[in-house]
Image: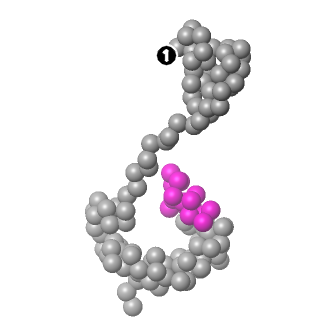
Amino acid sequence: MNCGTCRSDPKYKCPTCMVPYCSVACYKLHKQNPCIKPPSPPKQTIGVKQAVENLYPTEDTVPLDRLNLLENSTEVKKCLENPHVREILELLDSSANPDELVQEYMQEPIFTEFVDACLKVVQPQ
């Protein structure tokens, strides 16, 4: 890989388009023409059905048809309007130890309300 301007050994990359450059002078020359961010590769998402099918079922496994009911629950949607609930869920999703965090967040009434709304949908009567 060579400098995008003078073809010498690059030390840096343009933060926008990732073209390599070797010096401030080459960067300034490069920036005289507008550059664009390269397209990022498409994210691969796993649907609920695929994620559930890949798990080993246990006595606590919620059937797929019950999980699908969550997206239609007005009570769950109302809880998810709260940015604090969404932040908690993002933290849980990215945590290396979600079990410990769940115990901590179960002390927060807003999270407990969300959990109760989910359980009302998926738990058999």
* Residue at 29% from the left image edge and 59% from the top image edge: 54
Task: Sort mark 1 into few (<14), some (14-19) or many (20+) by Cα contacts within 10 Å.
Answer: few
Q: Nearer the viewer, residue 103 or 87?
A: 87
68 above or below 52? below
Residue 33 highlighted magenta (yes or no) = no
Q: Nearer the viewer, residue 34 or 80?
A: 34
Residue 93 highlighted magenta (yes or no) = yes
* Residue at 58% from the left image edge and 31% from the top image edge: 17
**Drawn side of residue 47 relative to residue 8, left or right:** left
Q: Nearer the viewer, residue 30 or 120?
A: 30
Q: Amino acid at mark 1?
A: Met
Q: Position of residue 51 (x, y in %)?
A: 34, 61
- The image quarter containing residue 49 is bottom left
Mark 1 element type: loop
* Residue at 44% from the left image edge and 42% from the top image edge: 41
Q: Give, as a single range, the part of the protein colored magenta.
A: 86-101
Query: Residue most toward the bottom?
Result: 125
Query: Residue most toward the front?
Result: 33
How does the figure colour the protein chain or chains?
Answer: one colour
Most common SS among magenta residues: helix
Q: Position of residue 28 (x, y in %)?
A: 71, 20
Residue 7 seen from this side: yes
Q: Position of residue 22 (x, y in %)?
A: 63, 14
- The image quarter containing residue 106 is bottom right
**Drawn side of residue 20 relative to residue 54, left or right:** right
> Which residue bears the numbered disc 1?
1
35 above or below 84? above
Q: Position of residue 115 (x, y in %)?
A: 53, 76
* Residue at 69% from the left image edge and 24% from the top image edge: 32
**Drawn side of residue 56 relative to residue 32, left or right:** left
- The image quarter containing residue 26 is top right
**Drawn side of residue 97 relative to residue 62, left or right:** right
